[in-house]
Amino acid sequence: MTRTRVRFGCEQCGAEASKWVGRCADCGEWGSVVQVAADLLEATNSAVMLPDSVARPVPLGGVDVASSQRLSTGIAELDRVLGGGLVPGSVTLLGGEPGVGKSTILLQALLAMTRQGHTALLIAAEESPQQVRMRAERLGELNDRLLVVAETSVPYVLAHAASVAPQVLVVDSIQTVHDPDAPGVPGSVTQVRDSAQALVRFAKESGTAVVLVGHVTKEGSIAGPRVLEHLVDTVLQFEGDRHFALRMLRALKHRFGRTDELGLFEMLESGLEEVVDASAMLLTDRQAGATGSVVVPLIEGSRPLLVEVQALVAPTSAPMPRRQAQSFDGGRLAMLTAVLQRRCRLSLAQMDVYASVVGGVKIAETGADLAVAIAIASSVLERPLPAQSVVLGEVGLGGELRSVPQAARRLQEAARIGFLRAIVPESTPPVPGIELIRARDVSEALHLGLSPAPRS
Ligand code: TYD
Ligand code: MG
């Protein structure tokens, strides 16, 4: 047994004293020296007994990784984004706008996983089991290892999950379940957070892989997924334009892997199909040689993707001409328009300028600047870009062109699809299979790139 030593300390300045004194020797305060909890100090050193259930520190090399073996979802593009599959005991949030296909992709994954012999439980909080069955029939075979229940009460959800003990639990959606003991209506921030917390606890305790569906509105605002992001292990975002078949899945947060992978799907009558050649798919309906149309090789996730950007320039008498961008940053469009006006002497002052990206792909990188600029110039000058050309480069305020990351991979992809020429910044190194037309600035790129004006 350790002998408890009595210690004294000043409440004012924290100085220690070996015996009680009326005035602190350090700060001079009267009556501030008191006996400090020596037994408390001793207690933190030795008296706390760790119960057996508490994990002990282990050498890093001795950490067991077998327990984090991933469950393949049976959908290669989904596994790619997840870094191999769902991690048991983890919670994944699948966010996306209504109608993008969240319920569809998860049902397809559950059908595939149950086919592999796993047991899955689908909590249908938005739809009836009949609707789920009809969708499953549309997607392919039914499977008795997939259990479904229409339930919105969180305690009942947990009870069902405990009795079924599935490997995967899907809750569709987190906004429509509610905890009767928590305040607020279903879908409110407190309800969504409390419900998610209960499901996170269940996942950790049971080792079940839990997937929560969360609706996000166009503005990305709703009292839902955003408040959940720090509670869950993985946040997946499912995107795509309703009017196009292409769907993109990416990880915004992932505790078990990279976040730069992109999954590509096509929404068909028979469900989501994995896209093997996205570039070819995106360019199918393109009218090569049309004015205002330019193809740009992007990097989406970790793979190259060719997309078409279009611009339309139309005269207006409005005092404030429009600069309107779709799936592209509006500020960037305004800046590129200004560069064309000031550095290339294009008269756009009395013109509306529209730019859009075909196929519902959102461009968030500056590597598409030159493509947008050339598309605008092509439209206003009525000079097309010769077919079989792509355009790549960032544009600075001086009109100068800057190289973009991974140019070689992008240009290789363009060559693979059959493009013969690329208009690129001067510093771009050669790439086999594609002719590079190097330009210093936007003016030069327009001069070298666009076909001569049609003779009238
Ligand atoms: P859904 O998965 O219900 O979207 P979410 O759960 O994100 O709200 O899918 C919605 C759309 O997908 C709907 O408009 C119909 C369409 N769809 C298909 O085109 N093919 C299919 O096989 C299925 C099941 C749905
Ligand atoms: Mg749904």
Image (cartoon, rainbow, N blue to C red):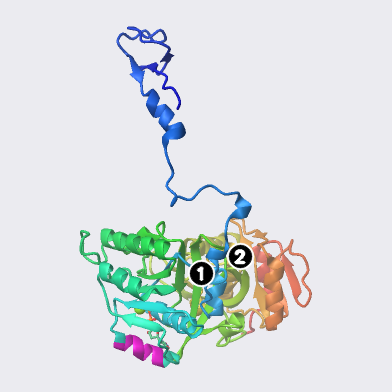
Decide if residue 32 is on the left or right side of residue 361: left
Between residue 100 and residue 140, name the one nearer to us: 140
Circle number at residue 250? 1
- Near-viewer residue (330 or 399): 330
The percent position of residue 168, horizontal first and vertical second, equals 43, 74
The amino acid marked with disc number 2 is Gly
Q: Which percent across, then down, holds residue 12?
A: 35, 17
Mark 2 or 1: the one toward you:
1
Q: x, y (%) of residue 155?
A: 26, 67
Q: Which residues are magenta?
A: 130-137
Left or right of residue 139, residue 446 in this image: right
The mark found on residue 367 in the picture is 2
Q: Is residue 135 magenta?
A: yes
Q: State if disc 1 and disc 2 touch (CB < 8 Å).
A: no
Camera-side residue of 109 and 6: 6
* Numbered disc total: 2
Q: Quadrant of ligand 1?
A: bottom left
Q: Secondary structure at mark 2?
A: helix
Foreground pick, 117 / 157: 117
Which quadrant of the rendered structure holds the C terminus? bottom right
**For residue 290, above or below residue 187:** below
User: Mark 1 packing: few (<14 Cα in 10 Å), some, or many (20+)?
Assistant: many
In the displayed structure, 416 sits above or below 370; it is below
